[in-house]
Amino acid sequence: MNNNHKNNKAYYGNFGGQFVPETAMFALTSLENAYNEAKKDPSFSEQLNDLLKNYVGRPTPLYYAKNLSQHYQHHIYLKREDLNHTGAHKINNALGQVLLAKRMGKKKVIAETGAGQHGVATATAAALLGLECNIYMGATDIERQKLNVFRMELLGAKVVAITDGLQTLKEATTAAIQAWVAQIEEVFYVIGSAVGPHPYPAIVRDFQSVIGNETQQQLATLGIKPQHIIACVGGGSNAIGIFSAFLNDPSVKLYGVEAGGKGIDTDEHAASLTLGKEGIIHGMKTYVLQDKYGQISPVHSISAGLDYPGVGPQHAHLFQSGRVTYAPITDDEAMEALLLTTQQEGIIPAIESAHALAYLSKLCPTLPAGQPQNIVVNVSGRGDKDMHTVFSILKNEHYD
Ligand SMILES: *Cc1c(COP(=O)(O)O)cnc(C)c1O
């Protein structure tokens, strides 16, 4: 254990830091300074809050899911991030960072994207706020996600195809970091999850903490004390967003759900905390899925948003400290939960969010019977983007 990190704000316990080329250090420092100033400036939060309310549609409802509650015999509340403009929580962060870019006098933003959700959110914010926008995307993903590529282009962004390696999110992220370092004066790099070098994980968490703050207020208004909160974890932004308001209250149990893919006894999953080892990826020290030579392993999940071999450093710390319980959910379990939620509640969740919903079937049987507990599930996004995946699975396989 290295305790030197304990008082360093770039670290969460042993995790985080700034593992970047020297040229990027200057940009990270000026980002941190600009962000600290923005935080103190009431006009910045006024502008952001106005957009969150009138453009994104916040606050999102905290919905009592009566039928799921009946099914599980516990009180299930859904935090409806699926109702946000552009269909997921990612817009909360994209708007915050693009506003910050504008404040810093940047004319151009860049971002990486896997399935295209963060790309669409960034292109949306850039269109709204009048900045040039380049999105780095693996060529394989471009092929798989044609509709989102078209959306980004329609919004005025340029989609840059990356043809290295597996041509997916990991390579797109590396390319975006390189492009950023090459044009560090003019360009703002909008990171899509609570990952990357300090101060990004803190900035993304802060912009997403609106989810947890609203949830806390909504529960208080209802006079309800939450006992369990569940969220899915890709890089970890929607999870840390809802957890952050409750981290200091030990009576609230927190659960982060990773992609178990085809099973954690196979090589096809993205369970970075359950099976990863400490390592460095994309500028941070965290848990990384890697082989015995330290090479980053290929990952699999039915949901593109959870398909990442690392995880945000604060989650790595919360895992090590035991404050949050992390568990894998397989592709099949997520699909079952997607169908259950759709048929019981008339809400089609994103497949990512279905991982969090599936955890109800693990958690509820372990709770005392006859004493309904209050459980909040963060529904990070809506399922529209996943219809082609769901369709092709249901054609080959029958679910009851
Ligand atoms: C991108 C995405 C995720 C995963 O990202 P986090 O940073 O872990 O939140 C989860 N759900 C949806 C709907 C997404 O689009």
Image: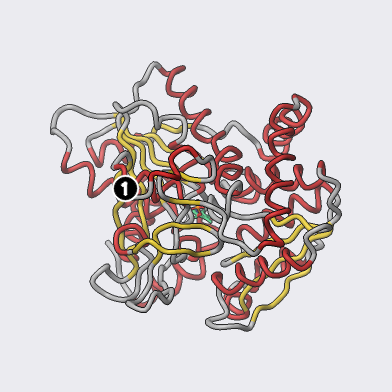
Which quadrant holds residue 84? top right
Q: Is residue 312 above or below residue 265?
A: above
Q: What residue is drawn where x is 41% and y is 48%? A: 315
Residue 177, horizontal then vertical, whole percent? 66, 65
Residue situated in front as seen by the camera: 339 or 332: 332
Q: Is residue 120 left or right of residue 202?
A: right
Q: What residue is drawn where x is 81% and y is 41%? A: 103
Q: What residue is drawn where x is 81% and y is 44%? A: 104
Q: Quadrant of the C terminus?
A: bottom left
Residue situated in front as seen by the camera: 292 or 334: 292
Q: Is residue 264 left or right of residue 125?
A: left
Residue 245, horizontal then vertical, whole percent? 46, 30
* Colour setting: secondary structure
Which quadrant holds residue 391? bottom left
Residue situated in front as seen by the camera: 329 or 320: 320
Q: Is residue 125 left or right of residue 244?
A: right
Residue 190, horizontal then vertical, whole percent? 68, 54
